Amino acid sequence: MRLRLPRERPTSPPRGFKLANPVLSEDCGRIGFTGVSIGGAQPYGVFDEARCMYGRRHRCPALRCDCGFYCLHTFAEALALARVGTHRRAAILEVTVLGAYIRFERGMRYARQRVRVARIGPCGCGLPPEVFVDAGWGRTGWRALAGACKGCAAGRGEVSFEDFVRIGGGRLRVLPGHREGPAEAAADPGGAARGVPEPAAEAGVMQARLDRLQGQLGRLTGGT
Ligand SMILES: [Zn+2]
Ligand SMILES: [Zn+2]
């Protein structure tokens, strides 16, 4: 007996939410995002395809691997993660999930994505962000950006939200702060994070464990 996941045929691509840090290439010619958990070493673009982070030659999301993009189903869950410890200043991305995906209780692991909206985290002083400044760290060829208010940004290398969008090809929306848009607010009145337990681990790692469990179940039941 093979363990088979139910097949879904959505009429439109699923939507998801995730945390990421905005990045700008050293030559200022490209923008991207880098994840806050596994796979965070490799920045991805506004539209991008997942590559196996272990360098294995299979398509993501492979069942026996934990590679691929990850997202959570709801803005509220992403916001709850953003309020935990070190992720307060990360951006909350709204993405369209494209290609093959594996659905979990709280999120998805999948092949391709388009970033539609980036909600930029608050300035270190707590005020809403107005521009990007150099976050003080980076990846090879990339520097990370953080949202800052005009006052705190003074004298530091600024990148406007408009320039970030333009460099990214113009189809991305950048919004200040971790607020939900009207559509999500209507669907979830009375507070985004209410009722969401604070996760002990990052969603990506948790989902990777779930996936391993699923793989083990497949072996136990004779699946391939
Ligand atoms: Zn893989
Ligand atoms: Zn500030």
Image (cartoon, helix red, strand yellow):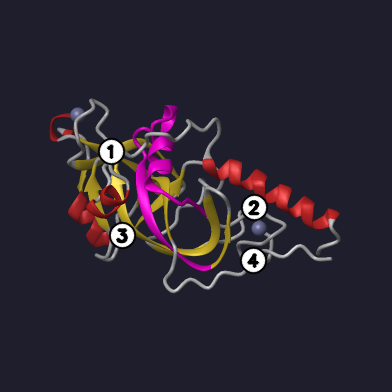
- For marks 4 and 3, the one nearer the N-term is 4
Where is residue 111? Give x, y as percent.
54, 64
- Asked if residue 5 lies left or right of residue 82, the reply is right
Tell me which numbered mark, 2 or 3, is placed earlier along the sequence. 3
Q: Position of residue 204 (x, y in %)?
A: 55, 45
Mark 1: secondary structure: loop
Q: Is residue 110 magenta?
A: no
Q: Residues within 10 Å of mark 2 (few under 14, many from 20)?
A: many
- Taking the image as shown, residue 215 lies to the left or right of residue 47, namely right
Residue at mark 4: C-beta within 8 A of ligand 1 = no
Whether residue 22 is visible to the viewer of this picture, yes or no, is: no
SS at badge 2: loop
Of the residues tagged 1 and 3, which is closer to the observer? Answer: 1
Say which amino acid is labelled 2: Asp
The residue sitting at 54% across, 61% down in the picture is 110
| Disc ID at residue 66 | 2
Amino acid beneath label 1: Gly
Who comes first in sequence, dot 1 or dot 3? 3
Q: Could you tell me if the residues under marks 1 and 4 are in contact, i.e. CB atoms within 8 Å? A: no
Q: Nearer the viewer, residue 193 or 205?
A: 193
